[in-house]
Image (cartoon, helix red, strand yellow):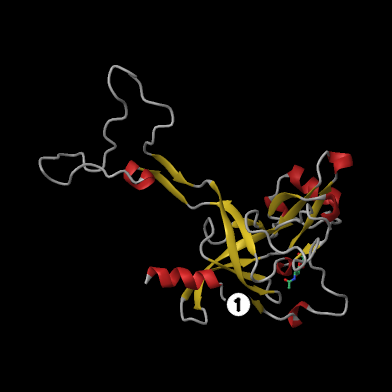
Amino acid sequence: MTPESKRTGLVAVKVGMTSTWDEHGVVMPLTVLWVDDCEVVQLKTEVNDNINSLQLGAGSKRAKNVNGRLLGHFANLGVPIKDKLSEFRVSEDALMPVGTPLNVSHFVAGQYVDIQGVSKGKGFQGVMTRWGFRGGPASHGATKSHRGAGSTGQCQDPGRTFKGKKMAGRMGNKKRTVQSVWVWKVDPARNLMFVLGQVPGNRGGFLRVKDAIRKKPDMDRTPFPTYILPQDELWEDMPVLTAPARKNYWDRFNKAM
Ligand SMILES: *[C@@H]1O[C@H](CO)[C@@H](O)[C@H](O)[C@H]1NC(C)=O
């Protein structure tokens, strides 16, 4: 492992939200993530594929719901049928063989992760909802123009509406990344992790979780390239690890008072 080493992330499922209290009695909103049978499906190397990366698969699907090409992909590589595939670029020393299981112990409580997913779709929304426009006046002679966008251009010059003008349209259902999410608890026996705050998407949606790029974890504490359970141990016996409350989280609360 060198300082430039980059390990893979995980594919997790958003289970839902819950909350708890830290030792100061400050409520902590938490999102529960479940790592559902995540394993290495394909190994790509610089020599063969011009890239060092790992394609991970998670979840499962019945063969009748998967198209033929994808079935061939799984069959050729000798892995079970996965519901979700996602590729992670890694450094050469973090490559792992096909079939390597990835469990939640890949991450350590107290580290920061970046979480990517598809945000909840809001449908076709007007400018007030989509962009926070103020709309028109509620009274004083305003008729039928309370939530409209108003004018979208200027005068004869420039004589057109600029590209990218904020207008009504489809909102949400976009790929979004939440950076530097704090991992509060890692529960290896149930393959669950609890992170502080929100992550994109609906319950049941798949997410890409990887080491934060802005708040890099301590490489000596995170398992590299991933956590492998020792032969004579059981997942059920692994302790649940909880990080001590973050100091700056408490500070922020004090300021708000
Ligand atoms: C760890 O990952 C493997 C492979 O995806 C899976 O079979 C196993 O159930 C996971 N362990 C736990 C405790 O869920």
Q: Place residue 31 in its image quadrant.
A: bottom right
**Percent x, y for residue 131?**
37, 44
Horizontal side of residue 220 vs 192, given as left or right: right
**Percent x, y for residue 125?**
37, 44
Question: Residue 248, relative to residue 3: is it above or below?
Answer: below
- Whether residue 67 is visible to the viewer of this picture, yes or no, is yes
* Residue placed most toward the observer, 112 or 136: 112
Horizontal side of residue 137 vs 166, given as left or right: left
Residue type (three-letter) at the residue carrying disc 1: Pro
Secondary element at tag 1 = loop
- The residue carrying mark 1 is 244
* Residue placed most toward the observer, 178 or 214: 214
Question: Residue 23, relative to residue 177: is it above or below?
Answer: below
Residue at image position (81%, 60%) is 225
Ligand 1 falls in quadrant: bottom right
Question: Residue 147, relative to residue 160: is it above or below?
Answer: below
